[in-house]
Image: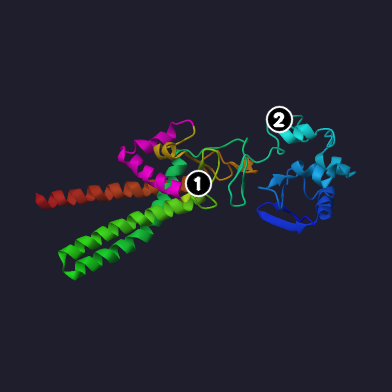
Amino acid sequence: MTEWYYADGQDRQGPLLVEDLRQRFQRGEISLTTLVWREGYPQWKPLSEAVEELQLQNLTSAASNLGSGFDLRGDYTAIDNGTAPLPGTGGGTYSPYTAPAATGGYGAAVVGGGEVVYAGFWKRYAAYFLDSIVVAIINVPVSVVFNLIGASSGNESLALAMSLVAMLSGFAIGIGYYAGFHASRGGATLGKMAVGIKVVRSDGERITFLRGVGRYFGFILSSLTLFIGFIMAAFTERKQALHDMLCDTLVVDKWAFTENAEFQERGLGTVTIVILIISGILTVAMIGLLILGFGAIAASMS
């Protein structure tokens, strides 16, 4: 017998027999927007696309599952083409009956057609500030070890080689951290997780590791343009920096391209504001230390 599965948030429920699935629908535990799958399906589908196969139109309480004013048996065309109105709204261009625009291939559906909140310059800066600290915590000890090995050897060639290894290891750590996290299920580094943003393709798809590597090199290019590549994120239509344009990526709110797009945050958010304040204090402190240092040098030379 055919076994069915359905998605309950991020969890998969099943296997269930057809009758079990019909009963859950009849009790209102699942609806036409619930994603279902059985062997033979290339991807998860909304339950609305399996109405006839599961004979849901024969359930006497099916209409109540959909809300008043919606005739399940008389509106298959609207369900199939995604134009069926949301129950109780009287219409709308987006419908949950529309199949997901694409799937990420890792069990998470990418939902198109909804509003997308792009991450602005300051949120991205706050995320990078945290990420740079994380990378430094990893990179500095590694660099110190290699440089100490070279310095203690007493061999200039070995010392130079160890310095080069330290530089390459730092480069590899940066690639592994940014490309690895950006290609992960959440599409976010630790810094981006903290401020609630993620990196995706322009269609909301999860990026691959190789694209993440390319984006890291593009990030370096944005730095070499006197940081103009980064500043572009404050003025472009979809808040894209230079490396985003080169790699077809977007930085968006973590709820973008999901079924919970209404959870997206438009403002900076408390975490971002706190990070920006800390960053500002540290920047002022560093400038003050540099001024004091130059003053001390000037005094000693006079």
Q: For the residue labelled by badge 1, is the local secondary structure a helix, a strand or a loop? A: loop
Q: Residues within 10 Å of mark 2 (few under 14, many from 20)?
A: few
Q: Please provide percent x and percent y for residue 170.
A: 33, 56
- Residue 222 is inside the magenta segment: yes
Q: Nearer the viewer, residue 79 or 8?
A: 79
What mark, if any, has residue 92 been given in the picture? 2
Q: Which residue is drawn at the image coordinates 77% and 49% (left, top)?
A: 30
Q: What's the magenta region? A: 210-237
Residue 13 can be seen, yes or no: yes
Q: From this viewpoint, is residue 88 visible? A: no
Q: Magenta part mainly helix, strand or loop? A: helix
Per the image, the residue denoted by label 1 is: 207
Outermost residue toward the right in this view: 60
Element type where label 2 sits in the image: loop
Of mark 1 and mark 2, the one earlier in the sequence is 2
Q: Outermost residue, bottom direction?
A: 153
Counting from the top left corner in percent of width and height, residue 110 is at 61, 43
Task: In this rendered view, identify the residue nearer to me: 282 or 46.
Answer: 46
Residue 9's tag is none
Is residue 126 one of those drawn in magenta? Answer: no
Give the amino acid at mark 2: Gly
The CA span between labels 1 and 2 is 31 Å
